[in-house]
Structure formats: structure tokens, C-alpha cells
């Protein structure tokens, strides 16, 4: 079963929503965050990336950054930019990007179900990234950004969501700077809440689509509160963390591509010879950009030309993880030929979300990198199968779009 619980969101007053909404904290660097928030004192980046308000602070992980985020939340509440919902509610959240619609429920999910793996994972986390969000949630005493969860589509839940949207006015309908439309309804009718809570209670499992670090951090902050309050009952807000929960049928995974700084000491001729010897058919496509059209087919850009790399059947393993295209590329080319053994930490490799397109790969290969690879996207079926089997995907396997809007809802741990 999946526990989904209503909560009293801290959210923007309607007139400020379009100014508050921002991209998630982890899809930009400090310079980009500063540029995005320039001239907008209401941007949520003043909370999620509060270092932009401390130009004298070089360390974005200094405690003063998290204290500034807390101060900004308090100021936004005092000034009426944020309001606190009067009673617990669930929230119907719809995003529209390039005509594609995804509709889900924002509520709170259980720390205990995360710990017991009823909320299933498919990625490992990095300690330093966990510590960042632990400090942010802990000092702010708030889940400032939601986790992005999914579940296998349920017609009954979908029917309730569609019926509510058709019969009620949203509190927000705003289009962010990236062109994504965000629509939010408050669902505070107890009958509707009870109905959705009951239906989610029949869902076997929730799955983390995006936000493994936020999930792990929110769970650990909940555990910290339990240590501080050993007489806790299990009903306190810190026993739950905020999530936006979408049916799998609505979601789209984009490719997550790779750029590498050098050819590991090889000449171009030596590199191509090794690629072919490793089991890839290489087709020179000239200057015409090429995007992989099927599994086990890759795109490569090197020295001004695009290439199609087709993996032979003989080199495709049978395992769930091993047969993923990101695994085939890593295990058959990046590691043995280019020497990228630990992509999580190797400074010679970087990762580019597919939403940025092939032009970004070309740009990187012609500037700070040498060679770029585009992969065919992982499917939702792949992700769910991996998580159901308790397995872990290779790093940087999935890129979801649209990203959740940050600032439209927060969850107080008090």
C-alpha cells in the first residue's frame, strides 16, 4: 500500500505565483541561478539557492546559506508573498509542455515507507549532495521542494483527478520562463481527500522518478526529528515528506547523454578501430545531426562529424541493467576504450540532458570536450522493472521533463 497524506502547504499568494515559480535547485549552477533571479525579488531561487543573496560567501554549502533561506521564507510569509493553507489538503497539479500534459497529486508520503522500500528507488545517492539538502530542510524546518514520484496508472485515480479539474477553478495557472504551464487546484473537500487516500492505499508501490537525493535527505531529517523527540507518535509532520505523484503513463523520459574530454591518448584512427573491434558498426553521416531512433543505436559527434554507432547483437547482454543503452555504452566503449571507469566521479566525463538537444552536444564537443554520445532514452517500463527488482541503474540514466515547478508548495515539518 502507498500512504498519501494531506498537508497544509505553504504556497504563494495567487498574485505572486508567476513570479515565485522557478526551476529545481539542482538543474543550474550559482551563476545561472543569479541570472534567472535577477530583477525578481520573489523568485523561489532566493530560497532554494539562497547563496545568490550572499555574494560575499564563496561556499554555497556554508550554514549561512541555509540560514538565509530560512530568513527569506519567513520574510515571504510576513510580506504576504506566501500563505499557509488553513486546513490540510491534497493538491491537483498539472503541467503542460509542448502540448504534452501530465497530471498528478501533491501530498505527503511516509518516511517509513521510504525506509522499507515501499517507495522504490533506482539510483544511488552521493553523500555530499544529501548533506546539502539535509541542511536545507533541517534549518528551514521545511521540505522546500517536492520529490517526483510515479506509480502504475490507475483508472480510478485518473478519473477522480480529471473530474475535479473539470469541475473546479485552479488557484494558479501560470507559465514559467521556460514555457512550461503550471496549473494547481486545492483539494480540501474531505470526501475527495478520503477517496484519493483510499485509492492510493491500494497502489502496491510508489517509485522515485526524480529526486533521490531529496528523498534520502527528507527521510534523514525526519529521523533527526525522531531522535530529538523520542516520544513521537508517528503522526507528526516530520514523519512525512512532500511529493508530486504522477501516473507513469503521463511521464516522458528524455535521453541523458555523455561528453568526454579526450580520446584517452588515442588518435582518431586508433579510436575508430577500437570502436569497431568492440562490436559497433560505424556509419559516417557527415555534418547532418543524427538522433538514435532505436535501442542499442547511438549517436556520436567527433571532430565536426556525426556518426551512427550500431551495437551488434553479440555484445548486448541479457540482464535488465546490463542491456540498458547507458550500460552498453559504458561497459563496451567508455570504460574499455576511453578509460572512464567511475563515471560518477571521473572529471573527464560530463552529462547533458536530452532536452538540450544535439546542438548542445556539438557545442560541448567543440569547446571544453572532445567527443559526444547521444543514447536512446530509457523507457518507463525499464525504470519500473529495475526498481521492482531492487536494482540500481547506472548514473545519469534518466532525464525527466518537464521539471517540477519549485516554490508552488512547501511542507512545514512543524
Image (spheres, rainbow, N blue to C red):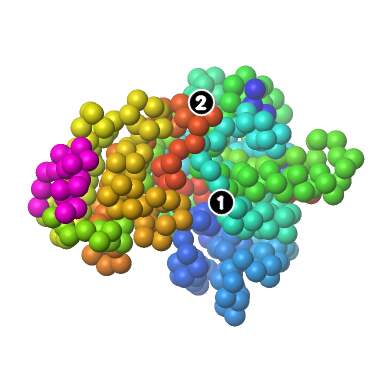
Residue 47 counted in the magenta span? no
Taking depth in this image into account, of 303 and 201 the one nearest to the observer is 303
> Which is nearer the eye, 32 or 267?
267
Residue with the mark numbered 2? 389
**Closer to us: 213 or 154:** 213
Residue 211, position as x, y percentages in the image: 54, 45
SS for dot 1: loop
344 relative position to 231: left or right: left
Residue occupying image coordinates x 23% and y 29%: 314
Q: Looking at the image, which residue is at 36% across and 46% down?
A: 256
Residue bearing mark 1: 126
Quarter of the figure that contains the N terminus:
top right
The crowd level at tag 2 (other Cα within 10 Å; few <14, some 14-19, many 20+) is: few
**Image position of 276 (left or right of 2):** left
Could you say which quadrant of the image residue 164 lies in?
top right
* Residue 69 image offset from top left, x and y in percent: 66, 64
| Residue count near mark 1 (Cα–Cα under 10 Å), binned few <14, some 14–19, many ≥20 | few
Residue 235 image offset from top left, x and y in percent: 80, 36
Of 77 and 208, nearer the camera is 208
User: CA separation, marks 1 and 2?
Assistant: 22 Å
271 magenta-colored: yes
In the rendered view, tell whether residue 134 sits above or below residue 317: below
Question: Magenta residues, as a range?
Answer: 270-286
Q: Is residue 226 above or below residue 165?
A: below
**SS label for mark 2:** loop
Amino acid at each position: 500500500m502507498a500512504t498519501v497524506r494531506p498537508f497544509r502547504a505553504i504556497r504563494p499568494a495567487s498574485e505572486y505565483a508567476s513570479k515565485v515559480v522557478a526551476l529545481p535547485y539542482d538543474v543550474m549552477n550559482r551563476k545561472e541561478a543569479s541570472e534567472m533571479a535577477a530583477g525578481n525579488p520573489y523568485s523561489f531561487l532566493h530560497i532554494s539557492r539562497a547563496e545568490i543573496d550572499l555574494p560575499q560567501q564563496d561556499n554555497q554549502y556554508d550554514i549561512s546559506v541555509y540560514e538565509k533561506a530560512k530568513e527569506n521564507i519567513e520574510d515571504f510569509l510576513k510580506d504576504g508573498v506566501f500563505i499557509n493553507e488553513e486546513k490540510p489538503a491534497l493538491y491537483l497539479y498539472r503541467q503542460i509542455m509542448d502540448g504534452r500534459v501530465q497530471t498528478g497529486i501533491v501530498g505527503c508520503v511516509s518516511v517509513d515507507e521510504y525506509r522499507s522500500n515501499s517507495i522504490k528507488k533506482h539510483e544511488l545517492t552521493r553523500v555530499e549532495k544529501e548533506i546539502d539538502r539535509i541542511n536545507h530542510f533541517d534549518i528551514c524546518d521545511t521540505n522546500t521542494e517536492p520529490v517526483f514520484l510515479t506509480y502504475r496508472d490507475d483508472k480510478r485515480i485518473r478519473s477522480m483527478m480529471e473530474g475535479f479539474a473539470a469541475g473546479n477553478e485552479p488557484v494558479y495557472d501560470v507559465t514559467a520562463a521556460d514555457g512550461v504551464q503550471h496549473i494547481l487546484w486545492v483539494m480540501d473537500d474531505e470526501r475527495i481527500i478520503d477517496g484519493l487516500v483510499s485509492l492510493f492505499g491500494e497502489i502496491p508501490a510508489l517509485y522515485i522518478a526524480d529526486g533521490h537525493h531529496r528523498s534520502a535527505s527528507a527521510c534523514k531529517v525526519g529521523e533527526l526529528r525522531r531522535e530529538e523527540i523520542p516520544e513521537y507518535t508517528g503522526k507528526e509532520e516530520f514523519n512525512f515528506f512532500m511529493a508530486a505523484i504522477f501516473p507513469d503513463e503521463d511521464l516522458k523520459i528524455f535521453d541523458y547523454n555523455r561528453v568526454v574530454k579526450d580520446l584517452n591518448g588515442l588518435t582518431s584512427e586508433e579510436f575508430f578501430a577500437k570502436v569497431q573491434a568492440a562490436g559497433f558498426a560505424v556509419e559516417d553521416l557527415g555534418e547532418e545531426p543524427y538522433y538514435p531512433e532505436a535501442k542499442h543505436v547511438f549517436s556520436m559527434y567527433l571532430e565536426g562529424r556525426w556518426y551512427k554507432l550500431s551495437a551488434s547483437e553479440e555484445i548486448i547482454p541479457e540482464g535488465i541493467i546490463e542491456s540498458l543503452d547507458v550500460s552498453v555504452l559504458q561497459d563496451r566503449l567508455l570504460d574499455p576504450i576511453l578509460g572512464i571507469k567511475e563515471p560518477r566521479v571521473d572529471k573527464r566525463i560530463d552529462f547533458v540532458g536530452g532536452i538540450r538537444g544535439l546542438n548542445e552536444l556539438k557545442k560541448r564537443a567543440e569547446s571544453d570536450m572532445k567527443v559526444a554520445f547521444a543514447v536512446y532514452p530509457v523507457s518507463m517500463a525499464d525504470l519500473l522493472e529495475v526498481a521492482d527488482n531492487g536494482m540500481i541503474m547506472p548514473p545519469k540514466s534518466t532525464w525527466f521533463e518537464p521539471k517540477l515547478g519549485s516554490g508552488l508548495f512547501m511542507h512545514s515539518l512543524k
